[in-house]
Amino acid sequence: MVSIATVLTAFAYRVEAACTLIPAWGDPGPAQIVPDAPFNLKFNVTSTTGDAFDSAIFDVAFSAPGIVVNSYIWGGSFHGSGYDNSNVLQGHFENFISSGPAFGEGALLSMNVILPSSAAISLNSLSVHAAPGTFALGTQEFTPQTGPDLMINIVPEPSGIALFAIGLSMTSAFFVFGRSFTAQ
């Protein structure tokens, strides 16, 4: 005979296994950044069974300290819900929907972020991790799975000397080629 606890555990596992929170690159092109330049991230939800939720609580962690979140916007019915209880400084995001359709799949949260050059010293990459807390539909709570961390390459800023050298070589090339064409 199967106990109720076994059935509930199996059901809870299905719900937890069906929904995944994944950090994603939000800009066109490769996932690479220059310190002190803004870039965009998305936190996407995928579901293999079409599960939906009306409450979302999760944390975001970066591998470098000092990341600045300029702005963020919730997706779907969470946008403008009036119940956003997020704490950006602590990387904590929390919101719920009191009316409207439940959220299923897509970009749950988008954010605009800056990696200050002071935090990028000696870094080649930055990782972004989404740590799911609790999602719920009504009173049924579940913990979504965590997708893989997002790895972003850090491109060093060109130094002033490098920019000067490039400008000098471009100017020299202009005069050399400019004279050879006009001398004929």
Image (spheres, helix red, strand yellow):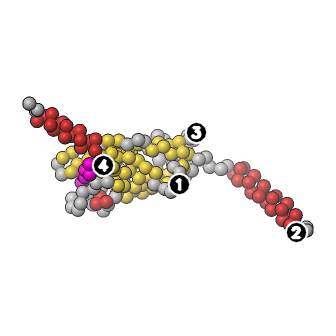
**Which mark, by number, is residue 156?**
none
Where residue 133 appears, as percent x and y from the top left, is 29, 43
Determine contact: label 1, label 4, CB under 8 Å: no
Instruction: Bin the neighbour count of mark 4 within 10 Å (Cα to Cα): few under 14, some 14-19, many 20 and up.
Output: some
Label 1 to label 4: alpha-carbon separation: 26 Å
Determine contact: label 1, label 2, CB under 8 Å: no
What's under tag 1, amino acid-wise?
A: Gly
Sequence-wise first label, 1 or 3: 1
| Residue range highlighted in magenta | 47-57
Sequence-wise first label, 1 or 4: 1
On screen, residue 24 versus residue 136, left or right, reads: right
User: Which quadrant is home to the N terminus?
Assistant: top left
What residue is shown with label 4?
A: 47
Label 1 to label 3: alpha-carbon separation: 24 Å
Element type at marker 3?
A: loop
In magenta stretch: residue 175: no
What's under tag 4, amino acid-wise?
A: Ser
Element type at marker 2?
A: helix
Task: Give 80 or 23, whichever is nearer the viewer.
Answer: 23
On screen, residue 169 versus residue 120, left or right, reads: right
What residue is shown with label 3?
A: 122
Front: mark 4 or 2 = 4
Query: How many numbered circles does the render carry?
Result: 4
What residue is shown with label 1?
A: 29
Identified at 17% across, 48% down, the residue is 139
What residue is shown with label 2?
A: 182
